[in-house]
Image (cartoon, rainbow, N blue to C red):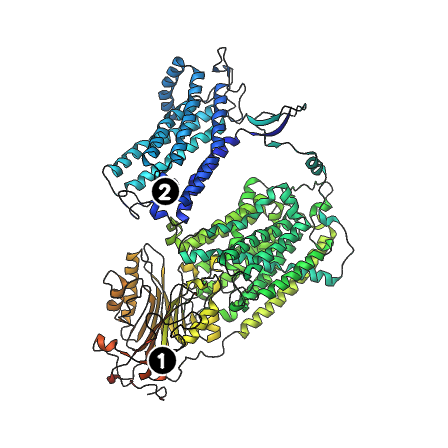
Amino acid sequence: MSTLLAFPAGWIPRAHTIIAYTAFSVALLVGWLSGLWEELCINSVARWPVEWFPSVSATIGDHAPPRAPFQILIALCATPRFLLLLVQWLVHRYPPAKPSISGERYTSKPSSNGNASSIDKPGLVTRAPTSKLEKEVEEIMEPVDNALRQEIGNQTLVDIELFVGIARTFCCGGWVYITSRDHHGVHDLFMILYLLLTLPWMFLSTQNATNPITKRKRRIPFLGFLATIPPLIWLFYKHSVLRVPGAYTYYAMFEWSLVIWDVAFDFMAVYEITHLQIAIIDTSTSSKNLPNANGRSSFYMAKSARVLARDNQREVDWTAESNAPSSRWRHVAAYLSDISAVCFWTIFTSLGLQLFYWSIWQLALAGSEAALVANLSGFMLSSVSAYRYVTSRQGLLTHRVMAVIFGMGFYIFPWPEARLVGVSIGTWTGWLALFGNWARLKGSEEMVAEGQILGSGLAITLLMKYINHSTNPLWAISHPASGGWNKTGLVLASLAMLEYYQRPVHLHPASPLSSHPKKKDDGTTIATPSKWQRRVFTIGFGALIHLIQTFVTDSGTIISWTWTGYPIKGPTLHPFSGVFIAIASLAILQQKAKSQALSTVLGAIGAIVLYRYPNWLGYIGGLLLIFYLQAIFPAYIRTASAFKPSSTFGYAMVTNIILDVVSVITAAYAFVPMGWIFRERTDLVLGFCMLFTILGWLVTRNIKLPEGQEIPLRSRKRIASTTRYTIISSMVLSIISLGYSYWKIPTKIPEPYYPNHKIFSGGIWTVHFGLDKEGRDSQWRMMQLIKDMQVDVLGLLESDLHRFVYGNRDLTRVIAEKLGYYVDLGPGPNHHTWGAALLSKYPILNSTHHLLPSPHGELAPAIHATLDIHGQKVNVMVSHNGQEEDLLDRTLQTTEIARLLEETADTPTVFLGYLVTRPGDQRPWPYQILIEDGKMWDVEIEDRWRWCEYIAFRDLWRIGYARVHESDISDTELQVGKFMLPKPGHPVHYLSNQEMYWHIGENDIPEPWRMPLMFRGNGTRGHRYVVWEGPLYYLPPERSGLQRYGEGWAIDP
């Protein structure tokens, strides 16, 4: 006989537990992600939000999206379930003859009548209860247990236990597959039977346990289950009989706890079956290759002769082949090809932006977030076959080519779904291309060179984004119409792939094991760190990647963190983005081990200063942080390559994904269940990342890694050449960045569209994070509409894009640099808002940023600015209030806006904001608060079709108003109002609403008053005037002295 397959019996309860918990968790998660949460909470007494947590029955059965994966997973749970019943029955009926691994102080053997009995042996005693509670439970259970055994017998009790377990399993299938919506009565009957059978099942399984540890541990979930039933019954009574709204939510939480206790109880079987193995034996063979049935047995599978022959062969690193030395130019070509790490950073940073497209348009978790698992390809290295392929020359080339084709080439598809799939595959294979190289090098000093190459690639990516108005021109969301360089990027990437394909072997990084004949090249690591060192370092590695992703992927990010408005008190984008890129380029040269401690201290100080201080001090702190992150990165990935690759790379990226999600929740908490936990807690995220990044370096800094004579000579030569070329490239990048950034300093003063008339236009637009409905970057299309509509003063909402899910972009750059505007970015990403920006053709004399009161919902940003419009001070307020669900928030926010507006009641003012209210709504809705308390006038009182965007004004003559369809750029139209400054000594005063809102035809007004004709009718590029056939025009009263202003008059009427 020979064993074909064998595995520890302990796997059975583990598999049962994992599948069961996964089934229920997935059902709950899918119900949330699919937008069914509110429907799942509805019952016969109350609805959402009174009932805010769904019951088990509603979650697993009421709707198809959560029901389908749950029923599939729970079906998979049947196999380990029945195996668990069988194995537990065997263990209880035939106890082990010697101590099991998890219970060495206890054993039993069959008695003469076949029943199990304790072995009375010196030194072997059962564990006595150690707590008062356990002693009391033992005193209660023991008489019942003894009476049953005397009356029925041990074997019969074990058989009853098996019967109850089988009946209970069938009842479970009844209430799982017959849902409450299919047949409520049958569903409830099976659930009641299941709960009733669970009590004897838990009692018998506990008392029949052969292992005292199992018995003790099983009492915890058993007592927890029992303690849950009384409040469960009481809450169900309150719901069904007393009909108390909200009671069912708490009933549901106790119901979910029953599931937790139930599954946890069955898991405890693992402590008494570890001495068993499950084996499949071929009885037709004569071999006696039987598994060793002991507690330390592991998985075994018979291998074919071919596999055995392959395993016995010594794996030789493919770089061990030697070639004749190459010319210096060949080394340069290889270095330039490796700088195609630009492609990796392009693909990696585009994933968050690509998946966030659906969240933007649904204003909720959309399921596309699952694409983040594309970062987890490192787990593939746990497979020997996958490891060998990923680290092979063919595997490295294939994954590089796939990353470029899918991650960058899929820009050609107009469908965002296709691009998401492509970028996900590109990210998966891009990481594999990196991990394959890192796993081969196993901590070699050559990993520092690999880190410098990656750092240089990141610096080039920064420069590309800076030149291309903060959008990476190689992203899949870019295309030629939005300023993309996609074809150029693909050509250069193809040349790099061709060079890599033809590169001589000796120009590839080499494993240090090739120069260690005493070491076996079987994937083992050079370093031997402890488990806690590996765990701390892995978390630190993931945190480091998150920090780089957050702060080092755009040169304007730390400027937006420190910006406070006008007058300017800190760095501006030009030229200080160039300084940022220069620091990031030069930091990768700092690779001396002795200087790492100083870099770490400076990095920690920089992170604290950046978070706590605005303007110049915060910016300097940000530069210190950037320097530290770039400097420490090569050393970090070198250490990572010395550890077990699958767990190190895999769990580091799990850490990174968690941090990515939490960092978004700090601002998006209002749209995520339980999101309030991380509301505005960027301090926790940043602090956690810095702490573990530093700890990861501290606990591994003394680990011995291969260097000097421990690595091949050609590796030492490659390190020297890479360092030389990195110095050159860093200097070149720094010079280009600084030169270009100084060249970009504005020298031309922005000019209004009507510079010779005291007329200006003000617009408000919610731009949906700069992604249109096709998932493309929309900045260039926005710029064209704003130019055509001749908007002098513009408020942009949902404009803060300096987060990984937005691509770390600056939404104002294309508009401001192409059309000429002064820009106030508004509160930065460290203030956790969706963003509000002010663009003005007129000088901004002063601006202050406000975070409006938001006790429940999303934070509301506001900019209160004073502009110099033709020598007259005019105030402008740009704000983004909360959503419809948070009436209190919107009331408080609008009250604060009204207070700010009322404080400057003697100054001409324009309000450009997002209110979420109907025109004319009374308190506590925002409309009346803004208009009355803020002493403002609505731009058009008869426009009843507004809900979000509003324009209001005072002490100005309003002469035009229009709403322009957004096409597919956003989900909200552009609103524009046109205003005229009053004549000196002629204050603005309307005698009545009829006078204020009297409309006049376009042919009856001077040319400067008019708005563009191109958007009448069907419009152009999908933009057209909506609500009315064209703009509305208004004539100031005759006493204004301005009724004919603009007919050939200069700026002074």
User: Would residue 88 be found to the left or right of residue 902 on screen?
Assistant: right
Q: Nearer the viewer, residue 585 or 320?
A: 320
Q: Position of residue 431 (x, y in %)?
A: 58, 52
Q: Position of residue 908 (x, y in %)?
A: 30, 76
Res. 571 in view:
no
User: Would residue 333 be found to the left or right of residue 232 on screen?
Assistant: right
Q: Amino acid at mark 2?
A: Asp
Q: Which residue is mark 2?
A: 62
| Viewport quadrant of the C terminus | bottom left
Q: Which residue is mark 1?
A: 1010
Res. 218 in view:
yes
Q: Look at 41% across and 32% down and name the residue there.
A: 173
Q: Nearer the viewer, residue 617 or 1046?
A: 1046
Q: Secondary structure at mark 1?
A: loop
Closer to viewer: mark 2 or mark 1: 2
Looking at marks 2 and 1 on the same chain, the residue that comes earlier in the sequence is marked by 2
Image-quadrant location for residue 916: bottom left
Q: Residue furthest right?
A: 324
Q: Amino acid at mark 1?
A: Arg
Decide: is 647 above or below 296. Answer: below
Q: Position of residue 843 (x, y in %)?
A: 40, 76
| Viewport quadrant of the N terminus | top right
Q: CA distance from mark 2 to mark 1?
A: 57 Å
